[in-house]
């Protein structure tokens, strides 16, 4: 049992739920309703801003929960799983932080950077610092 990877998987699951609910309402629906934008632009925004993150959170949650719970074969490679998802979420965190810094009040309005850095930290702890015992 690796508690850090389990926590990362749980947090990724919560992010998935939040993205499916609040994310659709506050970001996707207004973009799709913006008829002044070309349909291709609106559908591309749907894929990039909504569908890609949904797939990312779902896949991450599955692998992290399996590795954390000790389910083979994921649990046999906590360093690999922790490294991959730490790099992924760390990269997202840097990107969101940079965008948030680019406009006034962005750190509070585009707060996802906190989530991504937390996920990155849990993956580092569970996959790289304590891969064998997890706590």
Image (cartoon, helix red, strand yellow):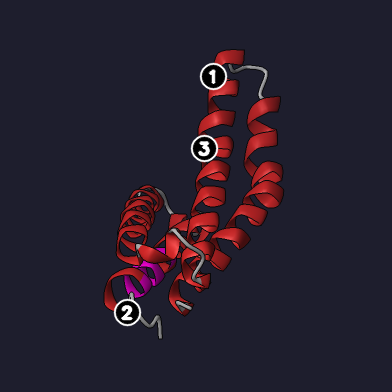
Near mark 1 (Cα within 10 A), the count class, few <14, some 14-19 or many ≥20, is few
Kindly report the secondary structure that dominates the magenta region of the rendered protein.
helix
Query: In this picture, which residue range is highlighted in magenta?
Result: 119-126
Q: Residues within 10 Å of mark 3 (few under 14, many from 20)?
A: few
Say left or right for 57 vs 88: right
Q: Quadrant of the C terminus?
A: bottom left
Give the x, y percent position of residue 29.
70, 35
The residue that label 2 is drawn on is: 130
Residue nearest the observer in this picture, 132 or 84: 132
* Residue positioned 53% across, 23% down in the render: 44
Label 3 sits on residue: 52
- x 38%, y 50%: residue: 92
Q: Is residue 38 visible?
A: no
Q: Tell which of 17 and 45 is nearer to you.
A: 17
Q: Give the distance between the C-alpha atoms of the residues marked 2 and 1, in whole angstroms.
A: 44 Å
Q: Which secondary structure, mark 2? A: loop
Q: Is residue 102 above or below residue 125?
A: above
* Sequence-first disc among 2 and 3: 3
Is any atom of residue 88 visible in this view? yes
Residue 125 forms part of the magenta stretch: yes
Residue for point 55% across, 42% down:
55
Residue under circle 1? 41
In the visual, does 39 lie left or right of 135?
A: right
């Amino acid at each position: 049992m690796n508690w850090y990877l389990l926590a990362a998987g749980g947090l990724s699951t919560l992010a998935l739920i939040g993205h499916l609910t609040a994310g659709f309402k506050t970001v996707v629906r207004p973009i799709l309703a913006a008829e002044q934008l070309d349909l291709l632009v609106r559908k591309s925004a749907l894929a990039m801003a909504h569908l890609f993150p949904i797939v990312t959170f779902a896949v991450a949650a599955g692998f992290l929960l399996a590795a954390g719970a000790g389910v083979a074969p994921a649990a046999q490679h906590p360093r690999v799983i922790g490294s991959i998802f730490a790099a992924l979420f760390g990269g997202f965190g840097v990107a969101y932080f940079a965008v948030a810094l680019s406009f006034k009040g962005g750190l509070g309005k585009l707060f996802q950077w906190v989530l991504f850095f937390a996920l990155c930290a849990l993956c580092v702890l569970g996959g790289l610092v304590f891969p064998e015992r997890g706590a």
